Image (cartoon, rainbow, N blue to C red):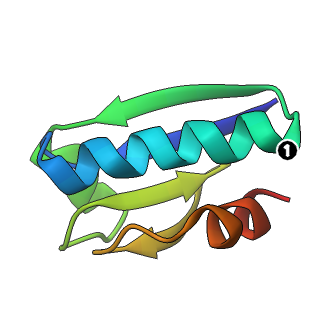
Amino acid sequence: MRLLQVLGTGCAKCQKLTQQAEAAAKSLGIEYQLEKITQIDRIMAFGVMITPALVVDGEVKVVGRVPDLEQLKSMMA
């Protein structure tokens, strides 16, 4: 099971990244757990200064933007 973590304060881009990440995981047919991290101290613990960000299994994959569906799928594969 993959752990997907969306780092962000809940802004529109953060919500879009959450939706896109879920869509990518579902289209790949992978089991996943999604966690939204909104606390600034927890976000900074990942070394992230710009949100939104996506962390897959503990590895920061994207920061400060919302990739398209195909890019997200390749990050999760």
Horizontal and vertical percent for residue 41? 15, 48
Toward the viewer: 54 or 67? 67
User: Quarter of the image containing the N terminus?
Assistant: top right
**Quarter of the rendering containing residue 19:** top left
Q: In the image, is 29 to the left or to the right of 4?
A: right
Q: Residue at 54% of width from left, 69% of height from top?
A: 68
Q: Eyeballing the image, is 50 above or below 33?
A: below
User: Quarter of the image containing the C terminus?
Assistant: bottom right
Secondary structure under tag 1 reads helix
Q: Identity of the amino acid at label 1?
A: Leu
Q: Residue at 28% of width from left, 75% of height from top?
A: 64
Mark 1, Cα crowd under 10 Å, few <14 / some 14-19 / many 20+, is few
Q: In the image, is 21 to the left or to the right of 70?
A: left
Horizontal and vertical percent for residue 18? 41, 41
Q: How many marks?
A: 1
Q: Eyeballing the image, is 41 above or below 72?
A: above
Toward the viewer: 60 or 18? 18
Q: Which residue is mark 1?
A: 28
Horizontal and vertical percent for residue 56? 63, 53
Horizontal and vertical percent for residue 36? 35, 32
Q: Residue at 53% of width from left, 28% of height from top?
A: 34
Q: In the image, is 32 to the left or to the right of 5?
A: right
Q: Eyeballing the image, is 62 above or below 43?
A: below
